[in-house]
């Protein structure tokens, strides 16, 4: 089959889809000293322990001596090393969500790594060692790398995707600007919002971008990363805080109104779930009162677990329970991040997902072992897309397309196919931009997958 090229070449899979593994940059002594490192080790041990039961944990260690030290820490904590591997690369810090690899799929569904520019959150911190990490990882994994360093500065924590074409972000953490007090966020000097949107559409796969103004530091060195106060639990649910807590966090009333009114690519409003802030100001494990409350929105969805920032606070249990209800197929694990929070981040900030090598689709009926369907490609697409179907016997095949509201938007196509592999082509001629579900019925088995139309 000849796959046509089109403007939107890449898309970032949703965090809640199946992972091959999770990437961590382990704390070390070479930038901020031994005390800094020692106060954070326990958090990384806890994350590795929770994650390694259902996916790989890829640890970036500063050097071989650090690898040995980390290995001993994990063994002492009875953490199995079966799913833990190491890559030796020097780093400045631990925030792999921001400086690390962004895994995306191309139009054929193949994994690529995007190496966006990283400048230490506008030049506030050293970044020369962290900046090359995406390319280093791509080389280690033998994956294609897209060098976007000279194209745009983009930190992974500055945006959230719903997996169905929507991206949520703050202007303050992406576009260079000055606030009324003269504070400057230097990310992409001279770049317009339209230019940023064009790049985000092409390389992240967003067909709809929801912008909040955000706010500039100094209280938040990230200049209001979205993952501190809002997160997509899935493609229909947005997790955030109540109005009072968002004001406490620093958002304007206009931003709050936009956030609460957010809709998907079909303009259907998200279900909004509110998480509390901590009841009290966060106090580190060594007794230092930070003077401000902690967020639970900065959680991380892995294959079988959800890592939730915990603070030894009365509201830990309430937040964990809400998140557990949101993710019934995963087990919530509270991660003590009090010392990490002192340094400006939480669990999501220090994790980065690596999707499986091949796209996964939702299977409605597993009863047929002699039937196989592959993810449509290209996806997203603007003209047509193809589904490969493998049949073990002569079969009747019916294909239907539904929009995000569950409404049938195409006349079902019914055909008879002999045993073998067949390519089913779907056209976007009559479909507006948006998220769709295709349903394939083979005899009495039903299979489905998600696709995105972008013209």
Image (cartoon, rainbow, N blue to C red):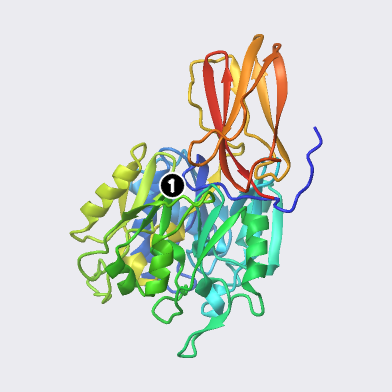
From this view, report whether residue 390 is shown above or below residue 224: above
Kind of element beneath mark 1: loop
> Label 1 belongs to which residue?
236
From this view, report whether residue 417 is shown above or below residue 238: above
Q: Residue furthest right?
A: 2
Taking the spot 61% from the left edge, 61% from the top edge, the residue there is 133
In the picture, measured across the screen, residue 251 lies left or right of residue 376, that is left
Tell me the quarter of the picture where residue 423 sits.
Answer: top right
Which sits in the foreground, 350 or 184? 184
Taking the spot 25% from the left edge, 66% from the top edge, the residue there is 285
Measured from the top left, where is residue 441 in percent x and y? 57, 20
Q: Residue furthest left?
A: 314
Measured from the top left, where is residue 31 in percent x and y? 49, 73
Which sits in the foreground, 165 or 293? 165
On the question of residue 126 being in view, the answer is: no
Which sits in the foreground, 142 or 409? 409
Measured from the top left, where is residue 445 in percent x and y? 53, 17
In the picture, measured across the screen, residue 334 lies left or right of residue 404, that is left
Q: How many numbered tags mark residues here?
A: 1
Q: Residue furthest bottom?
A: 181
Q: Residues within 10 Å of mark 1 (few under 14, many from 20)?
A: some
Taking the spot 40% from the left edge, 40% from the top edge, the residue there is 80
Q: Quadrant of the N terminus?
A: top right
Measured from the top left, where is residue 149 in percent x and y? 68, 67
Tell me the quarter of the picture where residue 220 sits.
Answer: bottom left
From this view, report whether residue 354 is shown above or below residue 423: below
On the question of residue 208 being in view, the answer is: yes
From this view, report whether residue 436 is shown above or below residue 134: above
In the picture, measured across the screen, residue 49 lies left or right of residue 403, that is left
């Amino acid at each position: 089959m000849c796959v046509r090229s089109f403007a939107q070449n890449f898309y970032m899979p949703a965090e809640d889809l199946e992972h091959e593994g999770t990437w961590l940059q382990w704390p070390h002594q070479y930038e901020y000293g031994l005390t800094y490192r020692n106060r954070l080790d326990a958090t990384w041990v806890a994350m590795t322990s929770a994650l390694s039961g259902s996916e790989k944990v890829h640890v970036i260690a500063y050097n071989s001596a650090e690898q040995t030290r980390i290995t001993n820490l994990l063994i002492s904590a009875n953490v199995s090393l079966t799913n833990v591997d190491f890559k030796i690369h020097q780093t400045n810090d631990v925030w792999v969500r921001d400086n690390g690899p962004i895994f995306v799929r191309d139009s054929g569904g193949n994994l690529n790594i995007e190496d966006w520019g990283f400048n230490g959150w506008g030049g506030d911190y050293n970044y020369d060692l962290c900046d090359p990490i995406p390319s280093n990882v791509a080389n280690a994994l033998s994956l294609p790398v897209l060098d976007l360093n000279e194209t745009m500065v983009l930190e992974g924590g500055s945006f959230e995707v719903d997996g169905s074409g929507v991206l949520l972000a703050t202007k303050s953490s992406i576009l260079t600007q000055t606030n009324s007090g003269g504070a400057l966020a230097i990310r992409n000097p001279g770049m317009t919002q339209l230019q940023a949107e064009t790049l985000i559409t092409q390389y992240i796969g967003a067909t709809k971008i929801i912008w909040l103004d955000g706010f500039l530091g100094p209280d938040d060195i990230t200049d209001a990363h979205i993952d501190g106060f809002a997160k997509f639990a899935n493609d229909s649910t947005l997790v955030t805080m109540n109005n009072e807590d968002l004001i406490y966090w620093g958002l304007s009333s206009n931003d709050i109104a936009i956030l609460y009114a957010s809709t998907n690519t079909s303009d259907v409003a998200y279900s909004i779930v509110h998480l509390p802030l901590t009841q009290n100001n966060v106090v580190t494990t060594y007794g230092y009162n930070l003077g401000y409350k902690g967020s639970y929105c900065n959680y991380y969805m892995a294959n079988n677990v959800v890592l939730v920032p915990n603070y030894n606070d009365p509201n830990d249990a309430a937040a964990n329970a809400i998140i557990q209800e949101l993710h019934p197929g995963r087990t919530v694990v509270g991660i003590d991040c009090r010392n990490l929070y002192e340094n400006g981040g939480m669990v999501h900030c220090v994790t980065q997902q690596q999707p499986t090598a091949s796209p996964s689709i939702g299977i409605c009926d597993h009863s047929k072992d002699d039937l196989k369907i592959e993810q449509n490609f290209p996806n997203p697409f603007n003209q047509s897309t193809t589904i490969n179907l493998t049949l073990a016997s002569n079969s009747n095949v019916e294909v239907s397309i539904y929009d995000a509201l569950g409404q049938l938007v195409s006349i079902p196509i019914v055909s008879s196919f002999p045993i073998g592999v067949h390519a089913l082509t779907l056209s976007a001629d009559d479909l507006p931009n948006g998220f769709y579900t295709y349903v394939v019925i083979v005899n009495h088995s039903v299979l489905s997958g998600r696709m995105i139309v972008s013209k």
